[in-house]
Amino acid sequence: MAVALISAAYVRIKILFFGVTFLPEKDPFDLFSQWYKAVLNSSCKEPTAMTLATCSKDCIPSARVVLLKEYSEEGLVFFTNVNSGKGKELTENPKAALVFHWIEFSRQVRIEGDVKLLDGEKADEYFSSRARDSQISAWCSKQSSVLKNWQDFEQAIELKEKEFYNTQVPRPDFWVGFCVIPKVIEFWQEGEHRRHTRFRYTLIEEGNWKIEQLYP
């Protein structure tokens, strides 16, 4: 099936067109929060999924999907293994881009900014909320490394299950949280006949955002 036909086949939720008068005057996080809450309260399958793009010190880009765990005006938070590909790239080059694509709402949000490593207390708090099996897996996964034999992974899990039997699973030091601090946030709303609506917020200084409407 042609891409155009696939696109036309999507059943979309009707969203009212938004213009300048409907946007928050100063804070893009107000609009993000409105959109995000609408998605959370819908039947969207993975509302927290976001594409995370990073770049190595040699300027080689890579991207993958991660899950948003929390957000505020300070930034957007996710957790990962610091020894993974993304973890290494963010350590070498602490800048990133995020993309949320909520296809059921015909909306997209793009974010660019600096990245900071969260303190261990924050990572401890979230790690303790995870399912025990997920905690064990985090200990045993040498994320992004070559796995020659799946049984090696299963055996490592069995050993950790015995080690932490009948006790709380602590957070491994390599399991950390990152926060993307936005400098640019762009909101995209699909329109008829490819006349999409786009607004870009660019941070001028703390609490002060420049708002521009962009061509589709």
Image (cartoon, helix red, strand yellow):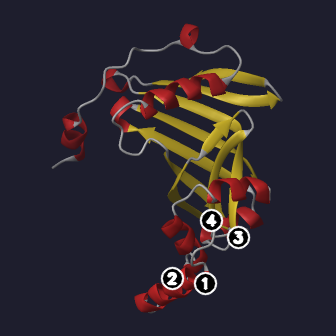
In the rendered image, residue 183, in percent from the top left (x then y), is placed at: 73, 38
Q: Which residue is mark 1?
A: 163
Task: Name the secondary structure under disc 1.
Answer: helix
Q: Are marks 4 and 2 in contact (CB under 8 Å)?
A: no
Rendered residue at 23%/40% (across/down): 4
Q: Earlier in the sequence, mark 1 or mark 4?
A: 4
Rendered residue at 39%/27% (across/down): 190
Amino acid on which the number 2 mark rests in the picture: Ile
As drawn, the label of residue 58 is 3
Amino acid on which the number 4 mark rests in the picture: Lys
Q: Which residue is mark 2?
A: 157
Amino acid on which the number 1 mark rests in the picture: Glu
Could you tell me how far apart the alpha carbons at marks 4 and 2 are, in whole angstroms?
A: 23 Å
Q: Are marks 3 and 4 in contact (CB under 8 Å)?
A: no
Q: Are marks 1 and 4 in contact (CB under 8 Å)?
A: no
Could you tell me how far apart the alpha carbons at marks 2 and 3 are, in whole angstroms?
A: 35 Å
In the rendered image, residue 138, in percent from the top left (x then y), is placed at: 57, 71
Could you tell me how far apart the alpha carbons at marks 1 and 2 are, in whole angstroms?
A: 10 Å
Which residue is the extreme one toward the top? Answer: 21
As drawn, the label of residue 86 is 4
Q: Earlier in the sequence, mark 1 or mark 2?
A: 2
Residue 84 location, quadrant? bottom right
